[in-house]
Image: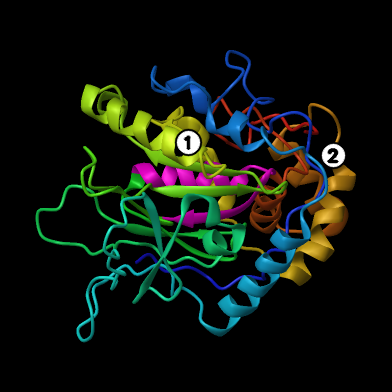
């Protein structure tokens, strides 16, 4: 597990959704960052899916209440949902409920504590199930393992989000930065297909909940894997089944690396609340259209005696918070031009 610095709890994101997608405005040659490397089998990008469906209005009270309860729980036991390592004692796998005799319907299996599971019918899954769920698989590391699990600290969740690979981590960063995302759940549930079905089970990589309450289930695949006929067939079945429960399904196969490199840089800016309250307004006041990062840092250093190194960390946080913007199609440097989003 990668270490992380304890930061302040992120508040529930604004009820007001931006009409424009924040992933779109920075690129000159692409209207959709997520679709730039999207699988041909994917009919809709995850960014469009997260803002589609339910109207972009006020955050539902059910979602607000659940997120506030989750954050209170995280304060008491931070990081418990990562489940990165198998326990030395106790069950190594979640104990799942057996099917009753004659039960031939598809089930959604979830866990509230990472030890025991429970079942829901397709039309019974609600937002609380997805917000309080623990990953359905562990994230252990083994010798010779190809993908190395990591834990990403999400400002949206206010806690660690477990990822089975760096590729999944790149998606988690994109989702964490998107203003329409209210929650990210890793390995949220397992679809238990009927006994005679061609598929046995399927555990998606993420469930992303929008600020309007829409749920988008995301499977992360490498581009070559996403077009494999067996994988395409599996995802078509999963998509049709999840549609019956009111969830959208998307296959994500990547985004331009420079995007996620920049976002990882911005996400890593850990700024104490007192420093943000003091320095952020000064950086924003010194902003002028087209000003370069270096010039802005020099200006606040001269006017307010804020060291350039400190100003740069605060600026990276402002970029993450969408208060300022840069061209995301180029690697971020002190020569980057700043603008308002």
The residue at the point 43 percent across, 57 percent down is 188
Q: Tell me the magenta residue range.
A: 167-186
Query: In the rendering, at what x and y percent does residue 238 appear?
Result: 38, 37
**Residue 47, quarter of the rendered image:** top right
Label 2 neighbour load within 10 Å: few <14, some 14-19, many 20+: many
Q: Is residue 319 left or right of residue 160?
A: right
The residue at the point 42 percent across, 38 percent down is 241
The residue at the point 84 percent across, 28 percent down is 289
Kindly give the residue lying farthest to the left in the view shown.
144
Image disc number at residue 287: 2
**Residue 163, quarter of the rendered image:** bottom left
Label 1 neighbour load within 10 Å: few <14, some 14-19, many 20+: many
Q: How far apart are marks 2 and 1 (CA)?
A: 41 Å
Relative to 140, say whether 27 is above or below: above
Q: Mark 2 or mark 1, which has the lower sequence index?
A: 1
Q: What residue is disc 1 on?
A: 249
């Amino acid at each position: 597990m990668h270490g992380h610095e304890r930061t302040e709890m992120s508040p529930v994101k604004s009820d007001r959704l931006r009409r424009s997608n924040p992933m779109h405005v920075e690129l000159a040659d692409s209207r959709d960052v997520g679709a730039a490397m999207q699988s041909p089998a994917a009919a809709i990008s995850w960014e469009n899916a997260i803002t589609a469906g339910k109207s972009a209005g006020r955050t539902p009270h059910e979602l607000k209440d659940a997120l506030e309860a989750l954050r209170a729980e995280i304060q008491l036991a931070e990081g418990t949902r990562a489940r990165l390592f198998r326990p030395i004692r106790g069950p190594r796998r979640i104990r799942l409920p057996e099917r009753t005799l004659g039960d031939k319907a598809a089930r959604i299996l979830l866990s509230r504590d990472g030890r025991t599971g429970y079942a829901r019918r397709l039309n019974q899954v609600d937002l609380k199930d997805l917000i309080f769920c623990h990953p359905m698989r562990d994230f252990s590391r083994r010798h010779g393992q190809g993908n190395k699990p990591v834990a990403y600290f999400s400002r949206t969740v206010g806690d660690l989000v477990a990822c089975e690979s760096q590729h999944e981590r790149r998606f988690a960063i994109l989702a964490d930065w998107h203003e329409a995302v209210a929650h990210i759940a890793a390995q949220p549930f397992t679809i238990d297909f009927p006994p005679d079905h061609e598929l046995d089970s399927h555990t998606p990589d993420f469930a992303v909940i929008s600020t309007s309450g829409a749920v988008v289930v995301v499977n992360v695949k490498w581009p070559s894997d996403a077009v494999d006929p067996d994988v395409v067939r599996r995802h078509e079945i999963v998509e049709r089944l999840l549609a019956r429960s009111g969830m959208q399904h998307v296959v994500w196969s990547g985004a331009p690396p420079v995007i996620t490199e920049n976002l990882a840089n911005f996400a890593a800016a850990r700024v104490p609340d007192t420093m943000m309250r003091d320095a952020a307004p000064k950086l924003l006041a010194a902003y002028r259209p087209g000003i370069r990062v270096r010039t802005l840092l020099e200006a606040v250093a001269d006017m307010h005696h804020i060291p350039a190194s400190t100003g740069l960390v605060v600026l990276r946080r402002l970029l993450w918070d969408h208060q300022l913007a840069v061209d995301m199609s180029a690697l971020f440097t002190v020569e980057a031009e700043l603008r308002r989003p």
